[in-house]
Image: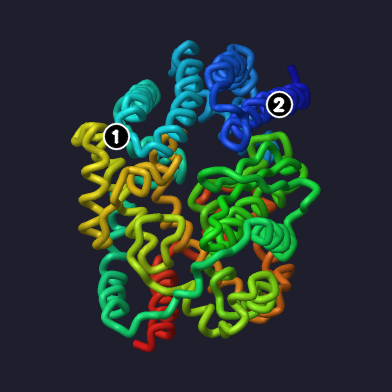
Amino acid sequence: MTQEQALEKLNALEKKKAAYAHAMGLISYDAVTGAPLGGAACRGETLAVLSQEEYRLKAGPETQELLAFLAGCGQALPPQAARRVEILRQELDETRCIPPEEYAAYQKLLNDAEAVWHEAKGKSDFDSFAPYLKKIIDTQIRFAAYSAADKDPYEYYLDRYEPGMDAKALDAFFSALRERLVPLLQRVQAAKQVDASFLTGDFPLEKQRALAQELMDVLRIDRAHCAIGETEHPFTTDFSKFDVRITTHYYRQNLFPALFSVVHEGGHALYELNTADEYAYTCLGTGVSMGVHESQSRFYENLIGRSRGFIAFLTPRLQALFPQLSDVSQQALYRAVNRCEASLIRIEADELTYCLHVMVRYELEKKLFARQMAVEELPQAWNALYREYLGVVPSCDREGVFQDSHWAGGSFGYFPSYALGSAYGAQMMHCMKKSVDVDACAAAGDLAPVNRWLCENIWRHGKRYRPDELLARVFGGPFDPAYYLAYLEKKYTEIYEL
């Protein structure tokens, strides 16, 4: 077999893998956006069968032989092909450690757990969900031991979402945030509070849906390749750069959760839609890490969406759609959507308290994976940390431990990416402003220059570079959370006139 023949086989392999991932992804997407609850068992059986084929494609003998041959080509491989082989060999090593029957059973477990989570959340019944969550954690700990017996299982999953990240680095990162944000939060809480009473009322859902469509256009999302749906917990899923789905959740009494979730998920979508065409149907054709991915969603949601200029741009349209806002000034609206208020729901949290929500989840995940806490103790531990970190306590599990769907999908180690992404985004904004008048773009509702900068520096590269390499190229140096802290201090000092 020649190198050229091997690369042709690699292309065929990745296209087949992409097809299976597409099919399995569509089933999962359908499960949370419109499929009947009673069909969960059927979907689970289908996913179990498909996942066996996916396993073979990831770690079967033919794949092992092909990747070993290509790895042996060394420097003769083109850089992009070498990076593909690097990623796929890591995936192969992780997958082949897991017995095929266990791999398939785990995919079925996640499908079942998602269905139970939705029903249990509606009833605020953690006891019915706890056995599934325990099985997920037990399985993940076992899988981590199969692949890296000498590594802490939780750090194994941290590294999967943000390669190179470990608990020591995250502890230092969160410590730096606490050191400067807690005093700032205390000053804000002692100041005169912002009037946000007009943010709640009666906001017809059909008008909110129309606004969501307009926001997608303002973000310049390619509507031919991206659709928006509705679900309990907003998310983005990418089947390829040619088929990306975002979702939101509308609340009649408050239009802003859906507004900002559309902008947030739109940031994810823009990343996926704008990876380089030549990476399509390969492992390079997606975001490089969840931290970098969340930097894009948090960038659009907060650094753009909650900016003074963008709120000024949105105000006339909001007033046209919702007459009750007619007498609200741009300044009042800007301050209201950026008010600082301890709350129970992470996705609705202000920028200043947001990382405290992430820290709650991070601390609980570490304890669960270290076997320092039983799953059955999770609701009580959750409530205790919310009382300690934010001074609020959920009245029921629905607004507490059930508010995120991540754990039902097995996404342990994901949550720190939200805080890292927020900090990455602030440093990206600092770099972007050297060549783009971001404030003027936001005020005009013309995000094309912002999108072009991000596409050139981040989106088009997909997974071509490792996360640390990509960030170093963008930042011109190492990641530094000081940019994020300075941004928050400036913003909230001005809003609260400290």
- Element under label 1? loop
Spatial CA distance of label 1 from label 2 is 33 Å
Q: Is residue 366 above or below residue 479?
A: above
Q: Residue furthest right?
A: 224
- Relative horizontal placement of residue 116, taking residue 42 as reference (left or right): left
Which residue is at the front of the view, 13 or 232?
A: 232
What colouring does the structure picture have? rainbow
Looking at marks 1 and 2 on the same chain, the residue that comes earlier in the sequence is marked by 2
Per the image, the residue denoted by label 2 is: 19
Q: At 35% from the left edge and 61% from the top edge, which residue is drawn?
A: 343
Which quadrant of the rendered structure holds the N terminus?
Answer: top right
* Residue 201 located left or right of residue 318: left
**How many other residues sit within 10 Å of disc 2, few (<14), some (14-19) or many (≥20)?**
some
Residue 19 appears at what percent x and percent y?
Answer: 71, 26
Label 1 crowd (10 A; few <14 / some 14-19 / many >=20) = some
Q: Quadrant of residue 71?
A: top right
Considering only vertical position in the picture, is 245 above or below 143? Answer: below
Which residue: 70% across, 39% down?
A: 240
Q: Quadrant of residue 330?
A: bottom right
Amino acid type, mark 2 = Ala
Tell me the kind of residue under disc 1: Asp
Front position in the image: 179 or 116: 116
| Location of mark 1 (residue) | 152
Query: Is residue 132 left or right of 306 when viewed as pictured?
Result: left
Which residue sits at x=67%, y=44%? 245
Task: Judge whether residue 270 can be spotted in this image.
Answer: yes
From the image, which quarter does the C terminus lie in?
bottom left
Q: Are the residues flagged by discs 1 and 2 in contact, CB closer than 8 Å? A: no
Q: Position of residue 56 (x, y in %)?
A: 59, 15
Q: Does 16 sit above or below residue 472?
A: above
Residue 52 point in image, percent of width and height: 57, 14
